[in-house]
Image (cartoon, rainbow, N blue to C red):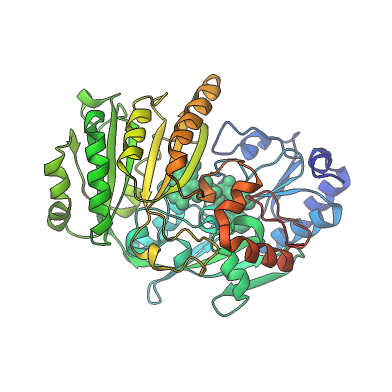
Amino acid sequence: MSERSEADAKLSEGFVEALRAGLRGQVLTPEDDGYDAARAVYNAMIQRRPGAIAQVADVADVIACINAAREAGVLVAVRGGGHNAGGLGVIEGGLVIDLRGLRGIRVDPRARTVRVEGGATWGDVDHATHPFGLATPCGFISTTGVGGLTLGGGSGSLTRSCGLTIDNMLSADVVLADGRMVTTSADEHQDLFWALRGGGGNFGIVTSFLFRAHSVSMVIGGPTFWALEQAENALRGFQDLIEGAPEELGGFFAFATVPPVPPFPEALHGRKVAGVVWCYNGQQESFDRIVSPLISDVPPLFHAPHDLPFPALQSFFDPLYPPGLQWYWRADFMPKLPDEAICEHVRHAATLPTSHSTVHLYPLNGVAARVGAGDTAYRHRDAFWSQVIVGVDPDPSKAETLREWTIGYYEALHPFSTGAAYVNFMMDEGTDRVRATYGANYDRLATIKRQYDPDNFFRVNQNVPPAQ
Ligand SMILES: Cc1cc2nc3c(=O)[nH]c(=O)nc-3n(C[C@H](O)[C@H](O)[C@H](O)COP(=O)(O)OP(=O)(O)OC[C@H]3O[C@@H](n4cnc5c(N)ncnc54)[C@H](O)[C@@H]3O)c2cc1C
């Protein structure tokens, strides 16, 4: 059966009934209450109607779903937090294996590790680790799934000080396409362990991750805003600062519109600005000392970083970006930006089409950059920035405007890029883009794929087909 007709085929009643009988979790079909809520993903631009959604309750359910789908030739999508840019956690037709029931977390404060089930969110993890004064590097919105973010790499406010999320992954339990579960680490199934660290959902369903945790409790966090007229100097100044700053300093540069909510001064509400959202794992005085050259060279409109619990910083943006908005994404890895690229940024940022639309530049230097390009499937250790441009709005009728603006901005900056992009910020941009992104690591990934998933059972992802 072709991929298309396979996905379109309505699942047989027999398939659904057998699944229902075999699982502890529920199986929802389009006739069931709760189906529409269960199929919805974070990006409302993605509207797909799976044949069934298996809300798994345990690892045995995951194994049963994989075996049933493989034997029946049913296309499968795996859903973690449902945040993926291109909506890879849901498909048209076929079976969604929904991991949201697998959210158990256990912190080992003595070993400074945290074990996390495959359907947890980063908010769940931060909540569990914070009482122990610990955190694992993750992204910026607390509702993002641990599974998808980790398997693509995982960058965030602790990247400079503690590395990417994958650099802190110690082991993972994975259910493979043939229904076997293996544990992978630096000592077991090393090739699979290498592939999971950046290779996305290509290799199996991770039911449990073990992460290293770091001493992160209270941090100095929050935003600084500059007028767009100051944005060139602010971006150039931040780039120079972050290149040599102590690794405890994290933060990303953004173009955005000031939201009309406290703590932002009313005079700034609705104003387009350039900004930095800081995260410093240290004392206020040393933070002030480190950032003072930038703040005095380019005096900001607003500067309010202060001490707050790490989970508060990590959920700061949640109310501004609830699930259900329209999102159009384009991304690139960038080297240190030349002046010409900075000018292009400022020119395009002045045209942010809606108040939710934004551009982020995440610095990747520091600890993450000291890992070798071939040490993990994720290879962009020498990129300076992970850049993402997102057109965002609640109104579906703006979808085309968001798309056009995002692509126009992206095309202006892409010539300055490394040619690759972070897989977790990509929509469906085709196989060449995936190949370019994995670059020299692609052939090894395809070989490992052939070993663990020779029939490309797990293909609803940034797909790396098995080597021939
Ligand atoms: C608002 C927002 C902010 C973000 N911020 C950041 C950020 O700061 N840093 C960053 O690195 N990324 C960030 N991302 C990108 C994010 O990493 C990706 O969207 C990621 O795919 C989300 O994972 P998920 O589990 O929520 O997604 P899902 O849509 O559920 O899944 C995405 C992919 O991962 C696979 N997958 C998920 N869980 C598992 C599992 N347990 N086993 C096997 N495969 C699995 C799925 O099959 C699918 O292919 C952000 C995304 C959004 C929408």
Q: Nearer the viewer, residue 255 or 166?
A: 255
Q: Position of residue 375 (x, y in %)?
A: 51, 70
Residue 356 placement: quadrant: top left
In the displayed image of the protein, which residue is found farthest to the top?
397
Q: Residue at x 42, y 23 (%)?
A: 353
Q: Position of residue 295 (x, y in %)?
A: 15, 43
Q: Is residue 461 visible?
A: yes
Q: Position of residue 262 (x, y in %)?
A: 25, 32
Q: Is residue 1 above or below residue 147?
A: above
Q: Is residue 100 visible?
A: no
Q: Residue at x 88, y 47 (%)?
A: 14
Indicate left or right for 186 with 192 as reference: left
- Quadrant of image for the C terminus: bottom right
Indicate left or right for 33 with 353 as reference: right
Residue 448 placement: quadrant: bottom right
Q: Residue at x 52, y 55 (%)?
A: 120
Q: Position of residue 172 (x, y in %)?
A: 57, 68
Callout count: 0
Q: Is residue 408 above or below residue 458?
A: above
